[in-house]
Image (spheres, grey):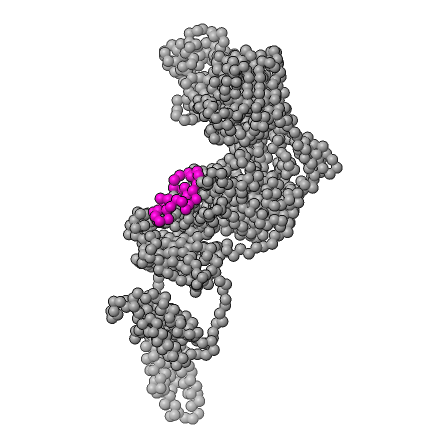
Amino acid sequence: MSIGDDLQRLRAQAVSQLDAAHDSAALAEWKGRYLGKQGELARLSRGLGALAPAERPAAGQQFNATRSALEEALAIAEQRVKHAAQHDAFEAEALDITLPGRQPALGRLHPSTQTLRSIAAVFGEMGFQIWESPEVETDAFNFGLLNMPADHPARDMWDTFYLDTPPGSERVLLRTHTSPGQIHAMRHHAPHPIRVILPGKCYRYEQITARHEMQFHQVEGLAVGERISLADLKGTLVGFARRLYGQAVRTRFRGSYFPFTEPSVEFDIECFLCGGDGCRVCKHSGWLEILGAGMVHPNVLRNGGYDPARVSGFAFGMGPERIAMLRYGIDDIRWFFSGDERFLQQFG
Amino acid sequence: MRVPLSWLNEYVTITLGVDELAERLTMAGLEVSAIERIGVAGAELPWARDTVLIGAILEVRPHPNADRLVLADVDYGAATPHTVVTGAPNLFAYRGLGRLAEPPKSVFAREGAELYDGHAAGRVKVRLRGRPVRGVMSDAMLCSEKELGLSDDHAGILFLPADAPVGMPLVDYLGETVIEIDVLPNTARALSIVGVAREVAALTGAAFRPPLPAVTAAGAPVDGRARVTVERPDLCPRFSLTLVEGVTIGPAPFWMQRRLTLAGMRPINNVVDISNYVMLELGQPSHTFDADRVADRHLIVRCADDGEQLTTLDGRTHALTPDRLLVCDPAGPLALAGVMGGASSEVSDSTTCLLVEAALWEPTTIRRTAAQLRLRSEASRRFERGIDPAAPPLAQCRLLELLAQYAGGTAAHGMIDLVAQPWQAPTIILTPTEVTRLLGITLTPAAIAGYLQPLGFGCTVGDDAVQVQVPSARHDVGLAADLCEEIARMVGFDHIPLTTLSDALPEQIANPVLELEQRTRDLLVGSGIDEAITYSLTSMAEVARLAPHQADAAGYLRLANPLSSEREYLRRSLLPTLLTALVQNMRERERTLLFEIGRVYLPRAGQTLPDEPRRLALALTGAREARSWHHAGDQALGFFDLKGIIEALLDRSNALGRARFVALRDDPRFHPGRAATLVIGAGADARTVGQFGELHPAVAERFDVPGSRILIAELELDAVIAATAPTRYRTISRVPATTQDLAVIISRDLPAEQVERTIRKYAGGMLESLTLFDVYQGPPLDVRQRSLAYRLAFRAPDRTLADADLANVRAKIIRGLAFDLQATIRA
C-alpha cells in the first residue's frame, strides 16, 4: 500500500461524505475530520517521515494536491449548502404577490384645479402670467366697461346674480365671466404690453341642471400690445389646442359675437369622441366648441387706458369644467361642486 | 330664426346644398343650429315622387259593407281615377253628393308609399300595401297630417288649397327644408328672410334680389283721414301709418300659413298673418289697428300717465307707469309701443278698416318694457336689437301689396311718415394698414371693397384707403374694427394665417402668493386629503347648523335674486358648505378627508365691494388608515392628526417656529377641550390665523351624524402664505450627534409646550433636536401627574461631545425644569 493509494482512498471517502453534508454543522464536522489538525489528512501526513528521501517530494506533492482538492470541494459544498439554506429561507419567506399592495394615502386635486393647471402651464410657456381679480364686481366692470351699457341686448347672454344693495347705490353682482379682469389688468398695466390669463370662479343665474351650473370656473386670456393681430390669436389658440389635445388635433374658427371683442370668433376642435363623424356629445356637428375669442374691442381698450389706434389685443375665454367634462366624459356638471368623494377620487 | 329655404330662395338663388350652405353660414357667424327636412330627401320621412301625389277627390260614395267607411274616387293625374277606401271623418259630408263640382284636393298615396302609421302612438313607419277592406280592395290612401309627418293631427285627411296641381308629387308642393339660425345680439339682420338672403348672396356669390313690392293705392289720400302725433320723438325715431279700407277678414292663403308655421308662428287671420309674414320677411314689425276702434283715427305716441291701464292681446291687464311708451288715441292707450297691441283696437272678424303702423322704437325702452312686463314677443325681440331705419316704408309697401291681394282692401293714397331722427349713413375710412394690423392679412383697397360691396356697403376705392358708406341695414357697423370683422367673415376665418405673437414679451411679475397656494394644495394632496370645491353661496340655516353664533344675516352679502333659499348668502367661511359635503360623504363611506381653498366675502364698511380673502378649510373623519388587510382601521383620526397636518404646512413654510397653539375653549363649533387657535408671530406682530379641532358633539347632532368624531379647521391662507420664510441651508456637521433621553414628570395640567420651552431654555446652543417620544399617565405616577419622555440630540460643530459636556448640560436642564416647573426626572 503506497501513500498515494491511501490518499486516493481518503479523497474518495471524503468527497462522498461531503456530498452527504446538507448544513453548515455537517460541513464543519467534515472539515475537522479531514482537514483539521487532528484530521485524516494530518494523520496520513505523519507517515511522510517514514519515506525514503527520494520519494518525499513526489509524496509531498500528492499530499498538497489532495489537500487542495478537498479544500476546493469544501468551498463548493459550502456554496451549495449556503444556496440550499437561502433557497429554504426564500421558500419560507415567499409572499402571495397577488395580495393587494399598501398604497400610500395620496389625495387628489379637484378636476377643475387639474384642468386649470394644464391650461395655465401651456399659456405660461407662451409668456402668459396668471392675474387674479375679484369675484364680486360692479355692474360697470362686468358689463359697462366691457362695451355693454345698461339695457344692451347682449346682457341677455349672461343671466346675473345681483347683490342686495341699498337703493341708489352702485349695482353690485357676482361676475358672470372673468372678463372684468381684462379691465383690471389693463388699468394696472397700461400703457405697457400685457399677456395674462385670468382664472377664477364665475356665477350665473341659471337653474342647475346636468349641463348648467350656477357656479363654474373660467380662464380668460388677454394679450395687448402694438403688433397683435387676429392671426396671432389663431396661432396662439391652435398652439394651445395642440398642447392640450395632441399635435394632430383639427381646429376651426368661425364668426361669432361678443360685445367686448371685434372681430369675435368661436374656436372649435374636431370632436375627439367621434373623430368628426358626429355624435351626441358634439350634437352631430363633428366639432366641439372649446372657447370664444376675438380682438379686444376698441372701446374696451380705451376703457382699459390704451389708445386703440396704436395698440391692439386679443382675448379669449374658456371653461375648465367643460374641458374636463369632455376630456373625462363626465355627463353631469353638478358633481363638480358636490364635494362627493365618489366623483373626486376618479381624477388625478 | 327659422328660415324655410323656399322663402329664402325668393330673394337669392341658393347654389349650394343645404349642408354646405349651413356650414358657410355657421362659419360666417350665423350659426345654423338645426336643419329640418320635411318630405324631401334626407327627411325622416321622405315623400316618394311616384307614390305620394296631389289628388282631387271627384266623388265620395258609401261603402257597400261598412257605415263608417266611404269610397273616394281620386284623380291623381292618371288616365282613370283610383278608388280609395277611407274612414276619414272629414269626407263624410261629401258622401252621396255625386260628382263634386269643386273636387277637394288632398294627398293621395299609392301602394308602396312609406308613411307613418296614423293609428300608432308616436311615429311608426309603415309601407302601404293593398288589402281588401270589408270586401273592397284598398291599395291607396288619402293621408292625414300625421301620416305625412307634418304634425300629430290624425282627425281627418289633409285638405290642400283648390289650386294645388293634381298629379304633382307632394314633395314639390309641400316639401321643405328649414334652417334654424341662432341669432346673436348683433346679428339683427338674421331676424329676417331678406337679411339672411343678403348674407347668403354675399357668401356664395349669388345675386341678391331685393324686395320690390308693387302697391296700388287706389283710395283717397290718407292725409286728413288719419292723424299721427309723436309726443316723444326721442323714443320714436320714425312712425309710418297707412290706411286700408274695405278689407275682409278671413284665413290667410295656405302657402302663407304654411310658411308662418314653418317659421314657428301660429296663423290667426289674413291681416295678422300678413303683418307677421312681413315682419319675418323684412325684419320690420308692424301693427294693425281696427281703424273704427281708434278715436278720430288719431294715433298718439306718448308715455303712460301714472295709473293708466291697458289690456294687451294676451288678455293681461297692466297698470302703467310713465316709463312705458304707448300708442294711444285721444281716448286712451291702444298698444304698448313695439311690444304688444291692446285688446280694444284689435282686428276682429268684423273689421273692415285698418290703420297700419310700421315704426322704429328706441331699443332700450322696448327692452325694459318687454322684460319688466314679461312680454317678450317676436316684435320686441327685433326692436331691442335695432331695425333697419329705412325699413318702415318698405314694410308698408309690402303690407299693402299683400293686404290688397289677400284681404281685399283698398289702400288710401300716400303714407304718413314722421321721421324724427333721419338715418345718417356713417362713412368709415378703412386702410389696408388697419386691416393688416387687426387681421394679420394683406389686402389691396380694391380687394377690401370686393369683400364689402356684396354685403351692401358702398365703397369708394382710393390709392391707399377705401371710403366705406354703411348701409342702413347694417346700422350695427360703426368702426373700422367692425368692417374688419366683415372682411374676416367674407375671407373666412379659416383662411387667415396662423402666426405667433411677435410683440415684445411683457415684463414678468413675481407671483409668490399664487405659487404658495399651489404648493399648499400639493402638500395637502400629498397628505392624503382630497380637494373639494363647494358653493360660494350658502344659507343662514347651513351656517347656523355649524355656528349659530355666526348666523346673523346682517354680516353677510345677500343676493337680490337668489335661485333658492339654500344659495342666498355669500359665505364668510368655507366650513359650513365643506362640512355639509363631508357629512353627505359619510352616508357612503366612513372615512373622508377633504380640503378646500377658496375665497370668502367680507363686507367692508363704506366700500362698494367686499374683501375676498383666501381661506383654507379642512374636514376629516373616519379611520387614520383605511381598513385593509394591512390595517385594522380601528384608530380614528384625532385632533393630533389635524394638528400634524397644520404643523407640516407651517413647517414647510418655515413658519412653525413662529407659530403658537392656544387652547380654544369657548367656540361653540368645537369640542371645548379639543380645539386650538393658531397664532403666528409674537408680541405686537402676533396674529390669529385660524381655528381647528374636534367638532362639538352638538354640531354633529345638528348635522344628523350624532356620535361621529369629525375634525375641522379653517385658516387664513393669505396669512399663512405671508408668514412663509425663505429656506436657509444649514451646514451639515461631520461630527456625530449624541443623544440623551429625559423623562420629565410634571403636573398633569402643565402644557407640554412649557416643558419643551424650558428644556430649550437650559439646553444651550448644542441642542440640535428635541423629540417627544412618550406621554404617560398612570401607576406608579400620582393621578395628578404625567410623564413626558424626550429624546435630545446634541452636537457641537467642531468636536465630538464628551460625557462630561453632556452630564453638565443634563444637570442644568434638570435643575431648570425643577426650578421653573417643579418637574422631577423619572429614573
Q: Is residue B541 magenta?
A: yes
Where are the magenta residues, as a range? B540-569
Observer able to see residue A221: no
Q: Quadrant of the N terminus of chain A?
A: bottom left
Of B270 and B349, nearer the camera is: B349
State the count of labels.
Answer: 0
Q: Residue furthest right?
A: B463
Q: Residue at x 35, y 46 (%)?
A: B544
Q: Residue at x 36, y 52 (%)?
A: B592
Q: Image quarter for residue B93?
A: top left
Check the image and report above or below for B517 versus B657: above
Residue B572 spot, x, y in % from top left: 42, 48
Residue B40 spot, x, y in % from top left: 52, 25
Residue B593 spot, x, y in % from top left: 38, 53
Left or right placement of residue B545 versus residue B104 in this view: left
Left or right placement of residue B634 versus residue B422 in this view: left
Of A33 and B27, nearer the camera is: B27
Q: Is residue B370 magenta?
A: no
Residue B53 spot, x, y in % from top left: 50, 18
Of B432 and B304, nearer the camera is: B304
Q: Image quarter for residue B468?
A: top right
Check the image and report above or below for B686 versus B494: below
Left or right placement of residue A120 versus residue B559 in this view: right
Q: Residue at x 40, y 56 (%)?
A: B690
Q: Residue at x 52, y 30 (%)?
A: B367
Observer able to see residue B611: yes
Of A324 and B794, nearer the camera is: B794
Check the image and report above or below for B614 versus A56: above
